[in-house]
Amino acid sequence: MHTLRIIAAIFEKDLRVEWRHRETLASMCVFGLLVIFLFNFAFEPAGEESLRLLPGLLWIAFAFAGVLGFNRSFASERENAALEGMRLAPVDAGAIYIGKMLANLFFMAIAEAVMVFAASLWYNFSFIPALGWFTLSTFFCTLGYVAVGTIFAAIAANTRMREVMLPVLQFPVAIPIFIAGVEASTGALKGDPPGDYASWIKLAAGFSVIFVVLSYLLFEFVLEE
Amino acid sequence: MKKTFPQTVHLAVTLAALLVSLYFIFLYAPQESTMGEVQRIFYIHVSSGNMAFLAYFLTFFGSFVYLWKRNESADDFAYGSAEVGFIFCTCVLITGPLWAKPVWGIWWTWDERLTPTFFLWLLFVGYLMLRSYVIAPGRAALLAAVVSTLGVVDVVFDFWVIRMKSYRGQHPAAVMGGGENSGLDPRMWVAVFVTFVACLLLFSYLVRQYMRVAALRRQVARLRQLRDSSSGA
């Protein structure tokens, strides 16, 4: 119960900070939109082709926008030595991780909704028929992506050139989730029977659970002085 | 440093094993019937591949021990394994295409064996870059240990995901565990084994050297600190 209250407090704090300066979400959304926008000029997909390219395009945009957001989430903690303050608090380090992870998940979900909406508009593609399964698969893949992104952002915050360090650490580890995300959303958007791509969603769910638990346990070492 | 197995002997045995493995690769093992001489790169390739995965696992092992016992030499072992493992992994990725070009006609394909090896290479790169970019040197060991623990779990997922992706298996079947059907001449088996042992010796020698240098470096830092504190007082 106590742990849940700590998680909620950190989650709420991150949301309030974001509400006051609106930096993270704005940069994630704008950057994601730019990726989708540039992609159009790189490939000019139309009709059938856009169905083939869209899942990959969306996941590239999610991946880059995510890195931007995760970096922000710990860079802002370091600016005023806020992380040191949190470290001094007599709370479980894992709870801090879960709180920050949930806040990042919340920001990612909003940014993803914006990107999907833009892609649907610009590529004349309706997500409505497959929305349920598409949302489910994207949820689990995003959870896994955010789970590794949050802990790697905390690690990268300790390095020079953290903007480069985060993708170098995170992308190789997030490859399974990236592949699962592309495969599952391709299946969903094509209108395949869910049984055909359910194994990808299961993989993403398994990845998410394992990496959330692992990061929860390891976060103590990341915060240790 | 323990005197149980002197370094010079270690070096001599390693060099001898490497020479012997060259004999086995080029003179003892028969020529492959369809691929010809180019197939001989296979001995180096397979051994390096096994060493690369083994090294990543040993990096994790060292990290795990470090997280548990906070033993500095466990961390040195992890770092050394990662550095040497990275070289072996690079070696696989170079020898593979050299063989593939004449045999397959292409340098690279996203096959179920090539792809995870490339992912492993990226994991090594991340680990090594992190170690050299951490601002506070005292924290590098801890952060790197966390990264290698996450990485080793990820390797399992890599194999799972690649199997599910059902890439066309371009790569020859696993030699280890291929059994009777792997089609390998018994003399080739001997050459594989000898090369692997030589690589293992090379790995152990290099990691040992790395650990020695790391220990000396720490000693120098300690002495320097001692000097500065006594002269400053």
Image: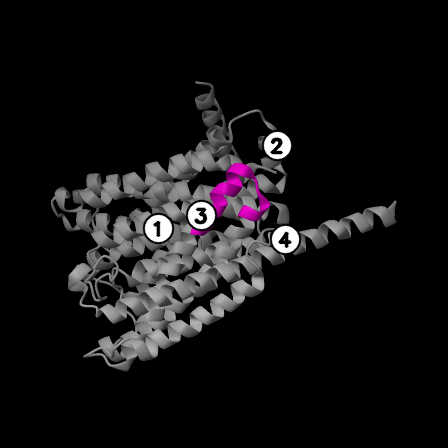
Q: Regarding mark 2 in the picture, which secondary structure is present there?
A: helix
Q: Are marks 4 and 3 in contact (CB under 8 Å)?
A: no
B233 shown above or below B39: above
Q: Please name the amino acid that badge 1 sits on.
A: Val
The x and y percentages for residue B145 are 50, 45
Side of B126 relative to A59 (left or right): right
Name the residue that disc number 2 marks.
Answer: A85
- Residue at the (26%, 80%) spot, across then down: B102
Quadrant in the rendering for residue A215: top left
Q: Does residue B232 appear in this view?
A: yes
Q: CA distance from mark 4 to mark 1?
A: 30 Å
- Mark in the foreground, 2 or 1: 1
Q: Which residues are magenta?
A: B58-74
User: If you read the primary sequence from the N terminus, does the residue marked by circle 4 or circle 1 appear first?
Assistant: 1
Q: Regarding mark 4 in the picture, which secondary structure is present there?
A: helix
Q: CA distance from mark 1 to mark 3?
A: 11 Å
Task: Give me the chain letter of mark 3.
Answer: B
Q: Residues within 10 Å of mark 3 (few under 14, many from 20)?
A: many
Q: Residues within 10 Å of mark 1 (few under 14, many from 20)?
A: many
The label shown at residue B155 is 1
Q: Residues within 10 Å of mark 2 (few under 14, many from 20)?
A: few
Q: Please name the amino acid that badge 2 sits on.
A: Gly
Q: CA distance from mark 2 to mark 1?
A: 35 Å
